[in-house]
Image (cartoon, rainbow, N blue to C red):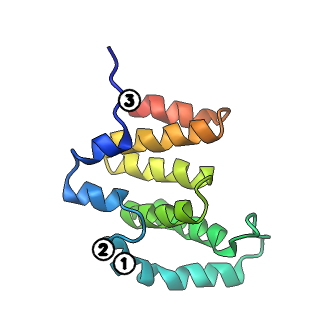
Amino acid sequence: MSQSISLRESYTHVTNHERNLLQPSNSHATQRRLPLLQPQIETCVQSSPRPQSNANCPQLDAIIQVAAKLQAEGKYEDSIILYNTAIELDPLCVQAYFNKGLCLQKCGQHSLAIECYDRVIQLQPQHFSAYYNKGKTL
């Protein structure tokens, strides 16, 4: 028998460190770290040679670029903070959910990673990498 646990239910079972990874960008940890990342985001917005894919929020692409760079450097917690910010700006941003899932997976937060992959699948059912990573995480 498989038991599905919602994000809200799983939230009651996580440690404080895990809560910081899950919190939206208004969390205490994010309030401390996001200003440190802001110069990188501004530089990326100003120097980005490619057109912004989200005309309503030009910072969204820059936030995702900086988060991906930090993710490549192994700074998963900072990446998660930025992906949370991107998700707040655009709750339908598949790339932010997918990459956040990858970071959570690297941090050992498998149930939270699965929640992100499920959201990607809900938003874009043909996103085969989300199915693959979800299966790999289980």
CA gap, disc 2 and disc 1: 5 Å
Query: Is residue 74 among the parts visible in the rendering?
Result: no
* Disc 2 and disc 1 in contact, CB within 8 angstroms: yes
Q: Amino acid at mark 1?
A: Gln
The residue that appears at 57% across and 70% down in the rendered structure is 63
Q: Is residue 53 left or right of residue 19?
A: right
Q: Is residue 45 left or right of residue 83?
A: right
The residue that appears at 23% across and 48% down in the rendered structure is 14
Coordinates of residue 81 in the picture (x, y in percent): 42, 66
Q: Amino acid at mark 2?
A: His
* Residue furthest to the right: 51
Which residue in the structure is indicated by mark 2?
A: 28
**Which image quadrant for residue 5?**
top left
* In the image, residue 50 above or below residue 125: below
Mark 3 or mark 2, earlier in chain: 2
Which residue in the structure is indicated by mark 3?
A: 138
CA gap, disc 1 and disc 3: 32 Å
CA gap, disc 3 and disc 2: 30 Å
* In the image, residue 32 above or below residue 80: below
Which residue in the structure is indicated by mark 1?
A: 31
How many residues crowd mark 2 within 10 Å: few (<14), some (14–19), many (20+)? few
Q: Nearer the viewer, mark 1 or mark 3?
A: 1
Mark 1 or mark 3, earlier in chain: 1
Coordinates of residue 121 in the picture (x, y in percent): 58, 36
Coordinates of residue 111 in the picture (x, y in percent): 34, 39
- Please state which of residues 42 and 25 is positioned toward the viewer in this rendering: 25
Q: Amino acid at mark 3?
A: Leu
Give the numbered dot on residue 105.
Answer: none
Secondary-structure class at tag 2: helix
